[in-house]
Amino acid sequence: MSGTRTDPDAELFAQGVGNVVAPCLGGFAATGAIARTATNVRAGAHSPISAVVHSLFVLLAVLALAPLLAFLPMASLAALLLVVAWNMSDARHLLRVVRIAPKSDVFVLLTCFTLTVLFDMVIAVTVGVVLASFLFMRRMAEISGARLTEGEHPALRSPLPAGVLLYEIRGPLFFGAAEKAMGGLANVAANCRVVILDVSAVPAMDATGLVNLESALARLTAGGVQVVVTGLQEQPERLLKQAGLLEGCIQEATLPAAIAHAGRLAR
């Protein structure tokens, strides 16, 4: 809202201190919402000092003006809160997001908005984080995949050597996509002698991906097929080394080197 960056660590530390100190002074922590900050920004505040001044003003009002504030009509205070809530809602931005965002994101947004209005922000944020996590996993599973190539390959100048298959895995190899990504290795031809496993497009791998890869490598090894692994990134390589899966495989840094090595093995 202000166009500046904030330090979430400082904010969380301050809220933690406030939660600890408030009960010692007879108070209790009610909310960590941005109502006061948003009001300050809308009023033209430019620094955190505005929050300090606001806090001091509220403290002064509670200590010195409490008897007078008791005469304020509740209806007037309710109207004031409605105005603050409307200014915080940023309706134009909300409508724009609903219009241009993917349907899944719009669903999460409207769910959080509805839960915030009907219940409270804690419930809304909790449900929103869970929904967003599920949607993220679904998207990662959608972009993950694999391709099994024999002979001609669009990215290679010359065909693959006879008896050599190239299996490319794309996307994170995690529990939501592991079986889909490794399923193609079940269709390895009987005359295949070497499989090149290209994982250069796999940035991360979890335990489920590791188990599926281990099962696929075991099937290939049992069938007398040699595996050449190429393009390992840092996290998958560290995980495979810890599991000892690279001991029975040949590892090459680049795809051309892997193809050359596979060609020698297939002769």
Image (cartoon, grey):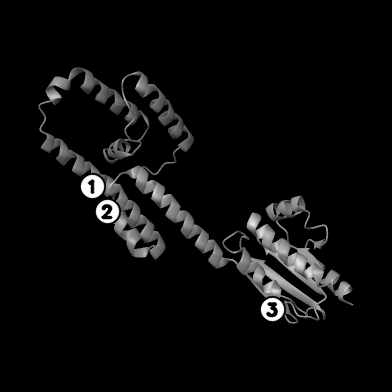
Disc 3 element: loop
Disc 1 element: helix
* Residue bearing the label numbered 1: 86
Question: Residue at coordinates 81% horizontally, 73% vertically from top-left?
Answer: 223
Q: Looking at the image, tell me whether mark 2 or mark 1 is earlier in sequence order.
A: 1
- What is the C-alpha distance between the residues marked 2 and 1? 8 Å
* Residue bearing the label numbered 3: 154
Q: Nearer the viewer, residue 32 or 3?
A: 32
Question: Residue at coordinates 36% horizontally, 60% vertically from top-left?
Answer: 107
Give amino acid for label 3.
Pro
Quadrant where the N terminus is found in the figure: top left
Residue 203 visible from this viewpoint: no
- Which numbered disc covers residue 91? 2
Dot 3 crowding, Cα within 10 Å, few <14, some 14–19, many 20+: few
> Viewed as shown, does residue 89 lie left or right of 65?
right
> Viewed as shown, does residue 129 lie left or right of 206?
left
Dot 2 crowding, Cα within 10 Å, few <14, some 14–19, many 20+: few
Asked if residue 24 is positioned above or below residue 260 in the image, the reply reads above
- Residue 266 position within the rendered picture, expressed as x and y whole percent measured from the top left: 86, 76
Q: Looking at the image, tell me whether mark 3 or mark 1 is earlier in sequence order.
A: 1
Say whether marks 2 and 1 touch (CB < 8 Å): yes
- Residue 137 position within the rendered picture, expressed as x and y whole percent measured from the top left: 52, 59
- What is the C-alpha distance between the residues marked 2 and 3? 49 Å
Q: Nearer the viewer, residue 218 or 63?
A: 218
- Residue 260 position within the rendered picture, expressed as x and y whole percent measured from the top left: 84, 71
Give amino acid for label 2.
Ala
